[in-house]
């Protein structure tokens, strides 16, 4: 049931987009095998239900923020809100270490997303082991796959100039301010 709900939420978010809806499909149609592979991977992640959705979303949103992919951030923060994340929690992702909005496990997952999103991706000593005290290997695999995919997605979208679809519907959007897009600051607009 949870998988059906997540699938439905994704469809609703995409259907409610107000602009640039065809940017990504316009590129993917040129390479059908790549489009099919992207779709299969998206479905595999969507249908993987061992790890808590909230943890996967938080890690994915943080990874999107770190790649500065406006398309990814736009969709991710809308999906986060659909899962019940408050604006305060989404804003707190910028400085999550000092925030009371997150549990210890959520902070570990966000740190994992940060470390996996660096180039080179170097996971600090003990982080994986700390995560495995709270999660099974299957759950950690799902979270790692979500982060890796968000990085791939963000870098592909950045390379192709894919623009946000304006799914935030007038609410807070985590897209970086224009003067910060080329920097490393994660400030929100």
Image (cartoon, rainbow, N blue to C red):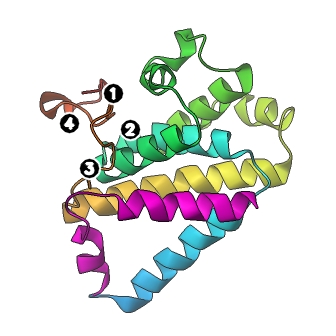
The crowd level at tag 4 (other Cα within 10 Å; few <14, some 14-19, many 20+) is some
Asked which secondary structure carries label 3, the reply is: loop
Q: Are marks 1 and 2 in contact (CB under 8 Å)?
A: yes
As measured in the structure, the alpha-carbon distance from the residue carrying label 2 to the one carrying label 4 is: 10 Å
Instruction: Residue at 29% x, 29% y: name it.
Output: 184
User: Is 118 part of what is drawn in magenta?
Assistant: no
As measured in the structure, the alpha-carbon distance from the residue carrying label 4 to the one carrying label 3 is: 17 Å
- Quarter holding the C terminus is top left
Instruction: Residue at 49% x, 38% y: name it.
Output: 81
Which residue corresponds to mark 4?
181
Which residue corresponds to mark 3?
166
Which residue corresponds to mark 1?
186
Asked which secondary structure carries label 1, the reply is: loop
The crowd level at tag 2 (other Cα within 10 Å; few <14, some 14-19, many 20+) is many
Which residue corresponds to mark 2?
65
Which range is magenta?
A: 1-29
Which is more foreground, mark 3 or mark 2? Answer: 3
Instruction: Residue at 29% x, 26% y: name it.
Output: 188
Q: Are marks 2 and 4 in contact (CB under 8 Å)?
A: no
As measured in the structure, the alpha-carbon distance from the residue carrying label 1 to the one carrying label 2 is: 6 Å
Q: Which of the marked residues, 1 or 2, is nearer the chain's N terminus?
A: 2
User: Is 26 part of what is drawn in magenta?
Assistant: yes
């Amino acid at each position: 049931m949870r998988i059906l709900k997540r699938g439905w939420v994704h469809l609703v978010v995409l259907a409610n987009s107000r602009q640039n809806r065809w940017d990504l499909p316009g590129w993917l149609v040129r390479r059908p095998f790549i489009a099919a592979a992207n779709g299969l991977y998206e479905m595999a992640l969507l249908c993987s239900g061992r790890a808590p959705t909230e943890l996967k979303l938080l890690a994915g949103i943080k990874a999107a923020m770190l790649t500065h992919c406006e398309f990814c951030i736009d969709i991710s923060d809308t999906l986060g809100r659909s899962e019940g994340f408050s604006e305060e929690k989404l804003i707190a992702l910028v400085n999550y270490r000092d925030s009371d909005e997150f549990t210890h496990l959520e902070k570990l997952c966000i740190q994992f997303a940060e470390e996996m999103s660096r180039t080179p991706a170097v996971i600090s000593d003990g982080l994986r082991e700390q995560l495995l005290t709270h999660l099974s290997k299957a759950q950690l695999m799902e979270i790692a796959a979500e982060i890796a995919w968000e990085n791939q997605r963000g870098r592909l979208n950045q390379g192709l100039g894919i623009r946000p679809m304006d799914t935030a519907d007038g609410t807070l959007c985590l897209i970086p301010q224009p003067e910060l897009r080329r920097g490393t600051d994660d400030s929100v607009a």
